[in-house]
Amino acid sequence: MPTTETPPVASMFAQYHNVCLISERLHSRRKMFGSAYSISNLDLDYLEAPVDLEKKTSDNHFNKVFIKLHNSFNKQLREWRGPNNVSNFELKRNLSKAASSLIGIAPDAISVQLTSEPSLFFTAKKGDYSCYLELIFDEGTGLLDDSVVTLFNSNENLPSFAGTLEESLEYIESKVTG
């Protein structure tokens, strides 16, 4: 009798997350371009955030924290009254990318807040480190414009950093994990 392997939870969550992103992107594009816009018109290269889920952890802790953070964000998003040009897709794509990396440093606590500026403001605590990461979206284009990192080790303010999301995440990882 052939056996079928059950995919790891991280892999299943990554697939589910990708389907949600595709569906949201398609819905958003149909609103902009009309009902003739089809899934074949989508550029699917953006599905990059959940790729590292399986290598980041060997247990479900990563997935539980990731899902909890997404649920908190989704609740805030339903009540959000920010600029109309910042798409839910763009917010969620960058949330996933930042959350995956921040959860990868195994914080003791992590949260995210959706602000009216529009920005995503992450707070993570690991040992004596307190990390604040703000992802700032351009009000004109609705795309991620900049990210700013502020770190504290105990009461010492470490040098702040501003740059791309990838650069900011690398900076956080280098300072917090050594």
Image (spheres, rainbow, N blue to C red):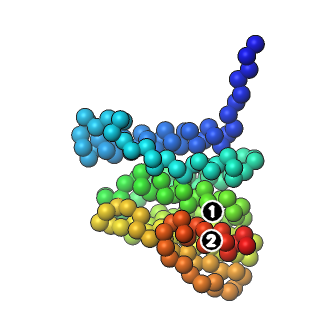
Residue 116 is at least partly visible in this image: no
Left or right: where 46 falls relative to 4: left
Residue drawn at point x = 45 percent, y = 47 percent: 45
Figure quadrant of residue 119:
bottom left
Q: Residues within 10 Å of mark 1 (few under 14, many from 20)?
A: many
Q: Residue under circle 1?
A: 102
Distance between the alpha carbons at the discs numbered 2 and 1: 8 Å
Counting from the top left corner in percent of width and height, residue 156 is at 68, 86
Disc 2 element:
helix
Q: Earlier in the sequence, mark 2 or mark 1?
A: 1
Counting from the top left corner in percent of width and height, residue 58 is at 75, 47
Counting from the top left corner in percent of width and height, residue 168 is at 55, 70
Left or right: where 77 falls relative to 171: left
Q: Amino acid at mark 1?
A: Leu
Q: Quadrant of the C terminus?
A: bottom right
Residue 2 is at least partly visible in this image: yes
Left or right: where 155 falls relative to 84: right
Disc 1 element:
helix
Q: Amino acid at mark 2?
A: Ile
Q: Residue under circle 2?
A: 172
Residue drawn at point x = 63 percent, y = 62 percent: 102
Q: Are marks 2 and 1 in contact (CB under 8 Å)?
A: yes
Question: From the viewer's perspective, is residue 165 above or below residue 63?
Answer: below
